[in-house]
C-alpha cells in the first residue's frame, strides 16, 4: 500500500491534550481554525499515554491524563466533518519528564531487571487498542510509534508488532522516527510509508535531505515528514527541536524557518508532505499571537507561508 497520490498537507492536532479537554466547543473550533488558517487536507490526531519512568514496563493508557476513547473518536469525527484525512498517532511519554527517546532496557535479559519483552508486551496492547479505533473510525493512516530512538534497534519486536497491527488495521501504516535517525531503522520494508521528524536547522536542510533521499530510494517507499516545525522564538530556526530554548517571541524566526524548509523540499519530489507541529486543542486568543513563542502558527506570519505552500501542492 502506498501513501496515495495525494500530497499530505497536514498539521498535528491536539497534542498535550489532557482528559476532558477534547470534548469542548473550543476544541472543535480549534480544529476548524486549523484547517481554514493553514489550508490543510490532513491532520495527525496526537495524544499521549504515560509510563512512570523510561525503565517502566507498563503503559496504562486507560488512565488519566490520557484522553478517553470517546474523545479520540469525537476528534476523528470532527476531522472527517471538515473533510480532513486522518492519521491517528498514539504516543508514549514518561511521567518523570524524560523524553521518550530514552526508553531503554538491557539487550540481554537480567533477572530482577525490567526487560524489553515486558515493555513491548504492554506497548503492543497500547498500540493495538488504538489501531482498532483507527480501523473502526475510518482513519486513513496509523502511526505505530514516535521518536522511540532506543527501541529502533529492536527489529524483531517491531516486525512482530507490525504484523499484529495489520490484523486489526487495514489502512496505511507508518513509524515516526526521530530526526537524524532515518538511516538507522532497519525495518522500513515492513511499513507502507517512511516518516520522520523534520526538525533540521534552517541552514542544513539540503545536506539532511540528501542523506534522507538515499534511505528513501533504497527502500522504494513513499516518504513524508510526520513532524516538522519551529517555535516563534529568537534562535529557534537554528535549533527547532529545542522547545526549552530561551529567546524572545519572534514571528519572523518561525516564518524564516518555514520558508527555508519548504524552499529546500520543493525540488525533492519524493517528499510527499508534512504533518506540521503543532496545533493545540485549546488555542491562545488571536490578540496574544505576537507574544506566543510556541510551535503553533495561529495568528502568525508563518501561517500565510504554510497556506500558500500547501495550496500550491494540494491543488496541483
Image (cartoon, rainbow, N blue to C red):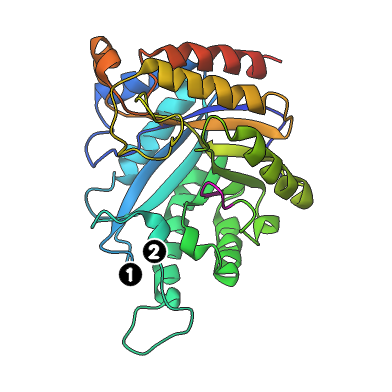
Q: Which mark is residue 103?
A: 2
* Residue 204 in which image quadrant: top right
At 45% across and 69% down in the image, what residue appears?
Answer: 120
Q: Is residue 137 left or right of residue 21?
A: right
At 41% across and 15% down in the image, what residue appears?
Answer: 252
* Residue 262 in which image quadrant: top right
Residue 275 percent location from the top left of the image: 51, 32
Q: How many marks?
A: 2
Q: Secondary structure at mark 2?
A: loop
Q: Magenta segment: does it hold 257?
A: no
Residue 307 percent location from the top left of the image: 52, 14
For disc 2, the neighbor class at 10 Å (few under 14, some 14 to 19, many from 20) is: many
Q: Nearer the viewer, residue 51 or 270?
A: 270
Q: Are marks 1 and 2 in contact (CB under 8 Å)?
A: yes
Q: Nearer the viewer, residue 35 or 246?
A: 246
Residue 270 percent location from the top left of the image: 73, 35
Q: Secondary structure at mark 1?
A: loop
At 29% across and 45% down in the image, what residue appears?
Answer: 68
**Residue that mark 1 sits on:** 55
Amino acid at each position: 500500500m502506498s501513501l496515495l497520490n495525494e500530497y499530505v498537507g497536514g498539521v498535528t492536532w491536539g497534542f498535550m491534550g489532557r482528559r476532558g479537554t477534547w470534548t469542548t466547543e473550543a476544541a472543535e473550533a480549534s480544529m476548524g481554525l486549523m484547517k481554514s488558517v493553514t489550508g490543510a487536507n490532513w491532520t495527525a490526531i496526537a495524544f499521549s499515554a504515560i509510563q512512570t519512568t523510561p525503565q517502566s514496563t507498563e503503559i496504562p493508557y486507560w488512565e488519566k491524563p490520557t484522553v478517553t476513547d470517546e474523545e479520540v473518536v469525537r476528534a476523528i469525527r470532527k476531522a472527517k466533518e471538515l473533510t480532513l484525512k486522518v492519521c491517528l498517532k498514539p504516543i508514549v511519554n514518561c511521567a518523570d519528564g524524560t523524553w521518550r527517546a530514552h526508553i531503554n532496557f538491557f539487550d540481554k535479559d537480567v533477572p530482577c531487571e525490567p526487560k524489553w519483552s515486558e515493555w513491548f508486551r504492554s506497548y503492543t496492547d497500547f498500540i493495538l487498542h488504538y489501531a482498532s479505533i483507527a480501523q473502526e473510525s475510518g482513519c486513513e493512516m496509523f502511526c505505530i510509534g514516535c521518536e522511540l530512538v532506543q527501541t529502533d534497534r529492536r527489529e524483531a519486536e517491531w516486525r512482530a508488532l507490525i504484523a499484529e497491527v495489520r490484523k486489526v488495521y487495514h489502512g496505511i501504516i507508518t513509524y515516526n522516527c526521530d530526526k537524524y535517525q532515518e538511516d538507522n531503522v532497519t525495518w522500513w520494508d515492513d511499513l507502507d510509508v517512511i516518516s520522520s521528524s523534520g526538525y533540521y536547522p534552517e541552514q542544513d536542510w539540503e545536506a539532511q535531505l540528501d542523506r534522507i533521499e538515499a534511505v528513501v530510494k533504497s527502500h522504494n517507499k513513499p516518504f513524508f515528514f510526520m513532524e516538522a516545525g519551529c517555535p516563534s522564538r529568537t534562535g529557534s530556526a537554528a535549533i527547532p527541536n529545542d522547545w526549552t530554548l530561551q529567546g524572545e517571541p519572534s514571528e519572523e524566526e518561525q516564518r524564516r524557518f518555514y520558508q527555508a524548509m519548504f524552499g529546500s523540499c520543493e525540488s525533492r519530489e519524493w517528499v510527499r508532505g508534512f504533518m506540521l507541529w503543532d496545533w493545540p486543542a485549546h488555542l491562545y486568543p488571536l490578540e496574544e499571537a505576537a507574544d506566543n513563542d510556541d510551535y503553533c502558527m495561529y495568528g502568525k506570519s508563518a501561517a500565510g507561508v504554510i497556506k500558500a505552500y500547501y495550496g500550491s501542492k494540494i491543488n496541483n
